[in-house]
Every structure is written in C-alpha cells, then in structure tokens.
Image (spheres, helix red, strand yellow):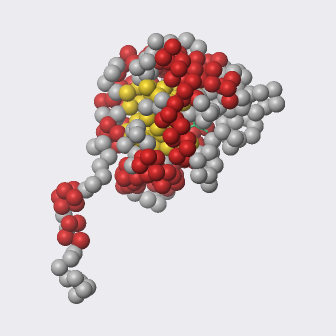
Amino acid sequence: MAGRFPEVRPRRLRRTAALRRLVAQTSVRGADLVLPLFVKEGIPEPVPVASMPGVLQHTRDSLRKAAADAAEAGVGGLILFGIPAVKDGRGSAADAQDGIIQAALRDVAAEVGDDVVIMADLCLCEYTDHGHCGVLTPSGTVDNDATLERYAATAVAQARAGAHVVAPSGMMDGQVAAIRRALDEAGEPDVAICAYAVKYASSFYGPFRDAAEGAPQFGDRASYQQDPSAGDALREAMLDVAEGADIVIVKPALPYLDIVAQVAAAAPVPVAAYQVSGEYAMIEAAAAQGWLDRDRAIMETLTGIKRAGAGIILTYWAAEVAHHL
Ligand code: PBG
C-alpha cells in the first residue's frame, strides 16, 4: 500500500508542528540578521523609497529611532548607507568628518552602543556625481589604485565615527588590504572588515539605486563587479580572506545560492549573504498583488539562504523578522 517498504514513512516526522520543529535543521535567528538603513542629508522628513515599500530614506532623527527599534527587536547588526546633499567627482563627502555617514554613525553609536553591531557600507557611488564606485581616469574608466586611497581614508573616518565594522562594496582589486593597512596605521586595529568579496553585476540592485541615489550616470559596473556567468567566486573570496577580511559577503543571495554554498565550504571566516533590493521588491510586489503569501515567502527565502551556508544575512526585513522570532 505504501510501496515496497511499508514500514518506511518519512511523513511520520511531519505529522505535527511539534515533530517538525523537533527535526528542523535550519533555523533563522534575529541575531543572524543585519538591517540596511539609508540616511539622507538635509531632508526634513523621512522619504519612502517607491520601489521598496516599507523602506525609507531616513533623517538623522528617524535613523536613530529605526536603529533603536531594530536593536530592540534583536537584530544582529545594522549597516548604514549615507546619501550626501552634495556630490562631486571624488566623493568628498564619503570621508568628510562632518559628512552624513559619519554624523549618522556617531548618532547610532550614541543610541545603541555595543548592543548591536554597527556596520558602515564603504563605497563611493552614493558620493560621486558620476555614480561610479571609484574615482575616474581622464578617459572615464574607474581608476583602481586612486580609488583605494579614497577607500582607505573613508574607512578611517568611519572607524573614528564609531563603526565596529566597515564593509567595502566597490569591488576594487586590493581594497581589503588597503583598508586593513589604513585602519591599523590610524590606530583602529579592532575595527573589522566585512568585505563584499563576491559581488555580481546584477539587475537585482535596481531598487537600491533609487534608495541610495547612486546609479551610474554613464556606462555600468561590469568592469568591476563580477559577471554572473564567470567562475571567479572562490578566487575573489580567498583573496579577500588573504588580505584580511574578517567576514565575506556574497551578493545577491537568491540567484547565487550555489556560490554561497561554495564560499561557505571554503572560507575560514564567517560568510554573509545579501538579500538585495530586487529580491525584496520582487516579494513585496507579488505579495501586494495577492500572488504569494508574503510572510511565508520571506521566511522561506531566509531559510534557504541560511541552509545554503550563510551564517549572516543582510536583509531589509531584518527588524520585522527579528521582531517575530
Ligand atoms: C554600493 C552598493 C550597492 C548595493 C550595496 N552597496 C549597489 C551597487 O553596487 O550597484 C546593492 C544593495 C541592494 O541592491 O540592496 N556599491
């Protein structure tokens, strides 16, 4: 009746919620989750991000509250993105002592202290008028080594403003080594580096570019972000580990779960996955149409990312999910 082995019935362990809970192997904890937060200089009120329902560009005040709420909910960390009022070719606001990201880091550090990990995204794309992640050569390509100097200065500014962790996301070669050296020389040896090590040139960053106002004004990021069909994930991850990365990020998450699993198996440091803006927007949009069950879809994707091997997940749902766990 039940096939050739009538005594073998996997369904026995699925019969009640208690049995399913007992045999569960993957669980998502609030402490695993990192909440990305956007703070914009010079706005009187928080501004909703149209392509990311529920996500705001914060004022300094509303950011403080959002950080306190997320810490209260039990998230593991926060990662801050700053949007300056004025942009220029070299992204001067990124490392300015009174720049928006530094001011926000000081605010959040005063609010949550060491209760939650404070991370700073470290890139130039929100700060440059051309929207690229680095400074440009006269011919308009991104100048790798000149950009490293900007990242080094930005890392030191962020560390001094209270970041526990800096998270370089610009995909320049040698960025982790340059930042580690700069932090150590500046007397900030305890500030950790969470490197966006494996970062694809992805269509799924679309909504983020509205939120962070960092879309490239010409060209694209394909000469520095990885090609989705390339095989360079482990090379990038291991280089960043060798250069001193304390945590490595794979990004995006859902279309790259094979990469998350490969990196988790190989890297001797914690591995994070970034469930990016497009992954968030897809589920929010489908749920708004009534096409899928939002809460179940969120937990299912987070469980899948965790099961693939990411111990840490950056997700715009971090505070909401942590609150319910
Ligand atoms: C900046 C940066 C991006 C994201 C995080 N840091 C955008 C990009 O590289 O184009 C994307 C995050 C998201 O889509 O949620 N370099």
Expressed as whole percent of the image width and height from the top left, the position of residue 324 reads: 29, 43
The quadrant holding residue 109 is: top left
Which residue is more in the foreground, 53 or 267?
267
Q: How many marks?
A: 0
Which residue is more in the foreground, 311 or 291?
311
Task: Give the residue displayed 31% in from the left and 24% down from the top.
Answer: 115
Ligand 1 resides in the quarter of the picture at top right
Any part of residue 32 in sight: yes
Any part of residue 213 in sight: no
Expressed as whole percent of the image width and height from the top left, the position of residue 187 reads: 46, 12
With 288 as the anchor, is 206 left or right in this view? right
Task: Give the residue displayed 41% in from the left and 49% down from the top.
Answer: 265
Q: Quadrant of the C terminus?
A: top left
Question: Is residue 250 depicted above or below 154 in this figure?
Answer: below
User: Going by the picture, which residue comes out furthest to the front?
Assistant: 242
Expressed as whole percent of the image width and height from the top left, the position of residue 10 reads: 24, 71
Task: Give the residue displayed 21% in from the left and 77% down from the top.
Answer: 8
Which residue is more in the foreground, 38 or 131?
131
Question: Is residue 305 depicted above or below 193 in this figure?
Answer: below
With 154 as the anchor, is 304 left or right in this view? left
Expressed as whole percent of the image width and height from the top left, the position of residue 38 reads: 51, 30
Q: Quadrant of the N terminus?
A: bottom left
The quadrant holding residue 321 is: top left
Task: Give the residue displayed 43% in from the left and 35% down from the top.
Answer: 247
